[in-house]
Image (cartoon, grey):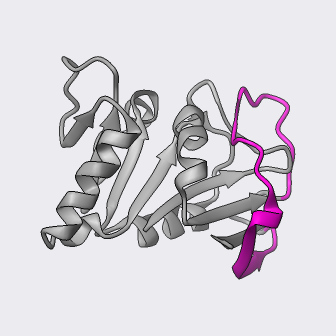
Amino acid sequence: MISIIVAIDRNNAIGADNKLIYWLPDDLKRFKKLTTGNTIIMGRKTFESLPKGALPNRRNIVLSRNAELQFPGADTFPSLKAALEDCRIQAEQGREDAKEVFIIGGASVYRQALPLADRLCLTEIDATSESADTFFPEFARSQWVETFREDHSADERHAYPFSFVNLERK
């Protein structure tokens, strides 16, 4: 199964200056819960934005056209297609962490993965960023069915209301 996991605001903004725009502790907990024990695929800039490098307890895959680049704790592939093919082979061979693949960014990787994704795991943030420079691609919600929603109000740890929403392709 190919899942995309992303936090988006009302305008599909996801980042600014290679950083997340919104700091939502519960979103980070959900991200960890869903991706732990699975494979995560990301672009080079997303990997470089991780404060401690490769995320633990997950297979980390970084996409880079530069075959000479190495990323500690991560496997590198030249394309999303090559990475997904390797995951398919690994899953067939019984590798547990290859059964579900999470695409975690950035924008160009999301754009490539969207037509292939079986599920979207969204955190919809009820806000609009003025500083955003990176956006999740537009998608037709009519092609997806909502299978899960959990709404959260703003509180002392979360400056904005947000919802966890899972969509599955029809």
Q: Residue at x 22, y 67 (%)?
A: 91
Of 143 and 158, the residue lying toward us: 143
Give the side of residue 27 with respect to residue 155, left or right.
Answer: left
Q: Quadrant of the N terminus?
A: bottom left
Q: Does residue 153 show up?
A: yes
* Residue 58 position by quadrant: bottom left
Q: Residue at x 52, y 69 (%)?
A: 30
Q: Would you say residue 139 sits in the magenta stretch?
A: yes
Give the side of residue 40 with respect to residue 166, left or right.
Answer: left
- Segment tinted magenta in the rendering: 126-154
* Residue 106 position by quadrant: top right
Q: Would you say residue 16 sits in the magenta stretch?
A: no
Q: Residue at x 68, y 40 (%)?
A: 21
Give the side of residue 23 with respect to residue 79, left or right.
Answer: right
Q: Quadrant of the C terminus?
A: bottom right
Q: Position of residue 154 (x, y in %)?
A: 80, 67
Q: Residue at x 32, y 37 (%)?
A: 62
Of 68 and 86, the residue lying toward us: 86
Q: Where is 150 relative to 22, above or below?
A: below
* Residue 149 position by quadrant: bottom right
